[in-house]
Amino acid sequence: MTDTEEAVVSTEDSSRFQDETMDSECKQSSPKTAMSTKGRRLTRREALNLFFALLAWACTATNSTIAVGSSAVVLLSIGGQSNLTSLPLGSFVFGAAFVSLLVTPWIFVKLGRKNGFLVGVAFGLIGTALGCVCVALQSVPLLIFSMIFFGMAVGVGMFLRFAAIELVPTHWRAKAVALVVSGGVLAAFAGPESAQGMKDAIGGDDLEFMGTFAMSGVFNILNAIFTVLISFPTCSDNDDDDGDEKTRASSDELKTKQLPTLGSLLRTRQFIIPMLVAAIAWAAMAMPMSIVQVVMKDVGYTSRQSLTTIELHFAGMYSPGFITGALISLYGPKRNVVAGIMLFAIALAFNFSATGKGPDDSNARMAVWVLGLFMIGVAWNFCFTAATVLTTELYKKAPPLKPHVQAANDFLMFLLSGAWIVSASYIFEAGGSGLKGWDALNWVVVGLVGLMGVFIILDPVLERFESQFNSQPKGLDEEQCGESLPELEVEKATTRTTSR
């Protein structure tokens, strides 16, 4: 980033940011919070908070697996065309993008953690109601609309992972995140199983899948109950994500420090490349997932077999969360992305090897589908988690811009990945449906994963170029850096005197 792209943050702006943060997160303070908590066990209240947060996140993730896992077959059951099967999932992702841009940057600051998460539950209940109506009216547009609200609900609920660190002492934060994320493993099976078990529970054939949406409403209500039971702290120490006190900017430093503008941060390599890696990881994971049940049905597999495949795919998405944080700490986020690319390659090899059921009903044929989708989920986790860590490194340069950088990252990530996901069913149809369409779709995923690899290769090259460019002298103007101008004028005067 060049000096001409930096702006001096005024004392007034910095103070206003600090005041808003303190008002929303530190309404009360206690001497106990200042005491060292290193090594102590969780109190009963802290343990209960963590337990309820795990259950709330499990409900959020379960609604995600219900919506994502059922949307394609619901669309076909209400008369939708097979070339539209990826459209509900694309709408789900666009809903998450919308809420990331317009809601999450301010909702927790204005309403607090608990009320903010309850707003997310309200979005989910709207999605539930619209889903039930879409089944009753056999309306594809209403299904698409309902998926937008499901995406918005999950977009808000995803912040439970970050809120978990506020519920425990500093030395418990890594464990807290891992425990809360473990709720996603429960959701990998609870969502698809409840959707399958309840799809015929309400009405006859005309109302098939009404029970599926009703179950999403049950999990939304449970989510609200668990959220209410969490005692979110009224005072936060406002640590960085990694809890490193050395990287925390003091109040005086924020008032005098030159901070980059939001626009200059969003134009940097450090923002663009992690955002593109995350977007491609989402697309490469979700494109095969969005149509795998349709493909498996076309080639002779039962709904039970395709459901098992989806369940293990979701398990692959969430289960690596227990180790990816430690791997990133040991080897760095960029190497984790490289490992994720290799895992994508292995998954794609399984996908290209997938075949129809066959007369022998061999378990080996089924295992190829399961391994392919499971490995895609694991690959996504590696790449997405690493890209998230890279993004957090960027906004440490300007702590006041943290929520805006996060919002811009999530919005662009979901917008780009959503566009690719929507195209999945069209690519499948253009490839000839069945296994031919499946292979055509996976070749597109090969291209996306290759593009991700290009970005990772180019990153150090661009870093060196950027370093060399920034090391060159640059002109400064008075408006951007007034304190440096007198020194520059003295240097110019000295040069003129010497030349004479």
Image (cartoon, grey):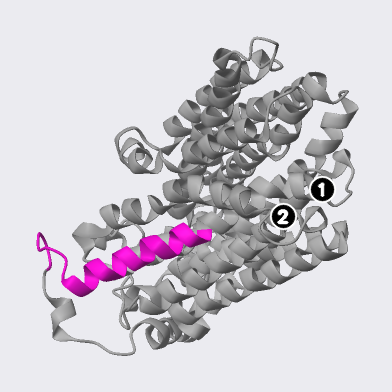
Residue 254 appears left or right of 1: left
Residue at numbered disc 1: 77
Q: How many marks?
A: 2
Q: Secondary structure at mark 2?
A: loop
Is there a contact, CB below 8 Å, between mark 1 and mark 2?
yes
Q: Nearer the viewer, residue 8 or 192?
A: 192
Q: Earlier in the sequence, mark 1 or mark 2?
A: 1
The residue wearing badge 2 is 209
User: Which mark, by number, is residue 86?
Assistant: none
What is the CA distance from the residue labelled 1 to the residue labelled 2? 8 Å
Q: Quadrant of the C terminus?
A: bottom right
Magenta residues, start to end: 37-60
Secondary structure of the residue carrying numbered label 1: helix
User: What is the x, y in percent for residue 318?
Assistant: 45, 43
- Kind of residue indicated by mark 2: Phe
Residue name at image x 53 percent, y 41 percent: 314
Q: Return the x and y of residue 271 as percentages of the image width and height.
A: 57, 50
Residue flagged by tag 1: what amino acid is it? Ser
Q: Specify the quadrant of the image occupied by residue 347.
A: top right
State the residue lying farthest toward the front: 204
Horizontal arrangement in the rendering, residue 324 relative to residue 66 (left or right): left
- Identify the residue shown where x is 51% and y is 35%: 312
Q: Position of residue 378 (x, y in %)?
A: 49, 33
Magenta-colored stretch includes residue 39: yes
